[in-house]
Image (cartoon, rainbow, N blue to C red):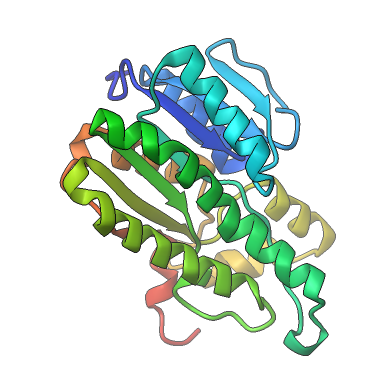
Amino acid sequence: MSSRLQGKVAVVTGAASGIGAATARLFASEGALVVGLDRNVATTTDDVITHQLCDITDPTAVDAAIADVLATHGRIDVLVNNAGADVFSEPLSLSDADWERCLSLNLKGAWHLCRAVLPAMLAQGAGSIVNIASVHGHKIIPGAFPYPIAKHALIGMTRSLGIEYAARGVRVNSISPGLILVPRIEAWFEREPGARERQTELLPPRRIGSPEEVAYTALFLASDEARFINATDILIDGGRTQVYHD
């Protein structure tokens, strides 16, 4: 490996599985000291990644987790806000509780982490925040309300924070994955025979993306190679969002 994050301290949320786990592993292999936060226990263990239980919707828990990272390592160079969850409903059937759950998981949680790490990044005059958004933040898919609202807002927050702190050495970017083969997608395919084949056919490359492909983009944005990239969103969807009609 090229040690592109050698000596850097990285916090990755949703690190117990899927994109978060792939990102944590890749960052560690590139020299970073990685702390993975998740409300679930990691399915695999790795001596080079420190896993902590943390609910990102609880600001007190987030502040405590970040304070622990700073007390242990003295700095935080990279934050990857990956934790989130699908919340889909017919709009008029959506309960207030599910509305709040969608925003808490997919927007407010990322803000809790940003707010917790920014003082340290600003004090050291350097830092990279990578928010994992979604193609739902670019295109509207029927039946997915209110998830796109949170992801549109997450991209907006990315751009706003990126501009706000650019002159102080902190970059904020986002990634918008399309269909990626994470555990919840695997579970969907198991529940619905033929879904994998139908979804694959819709994608221009005729294949589904892997968590590692998202992780490599996060690695680039986190590294000094991307030092002039800020307030930007990168789509990772095989070109699907550029197709006007099936």
Q: Is residue 137 above or below residue 23?
A: below
Closest to the observer, 236 or 81: 81
Q: Is residue 87 left or right of residue 130?
A: right
Q: Is residue 182 left or right of residue 225?
A: right
Query: Residue at coordinates 66% horizontally, 58% vertically from top-left?
Result: 104
At 70% from the left edge and 28% from the top edge, which residue is drawn? 42
Instruction: Kindly indicate the quadrant of the structure image that contains residue 204.
Output: bottom left
Choose top left, top right, bottom left or bottom right for residue 227.
Answer: top left
Residue 234 visible within the image: no
Expressed as whole percent of the image width and height from the top left, the position of residue 235 reads: 38, 61
Instruction: Tell me where residue 59 sits by quadrant.
Output: top right
Residue at coordinates 63% horizontally, 47% vertically from top-left? 182
Q: Position of residue 163 (x, y in %)?
A: 25, 58
Task: Give x and y (percent) for residue 158.
Answer: 38, 58
The vertical placement of 225 against 115, above or below, is above
Instruction: Give the camera-side residue of 240 and 71.
Output: 71
Q: Quadrant of the N terminus?
A: top left
**Is 80 on the left-hand or right-hand side of 127?**
right
Residue 194 can be seen in this image: yes
Residue 16, image x and y in percent? 66, 33
Which of the pair 138/55 is nearer the observer?
A: 55
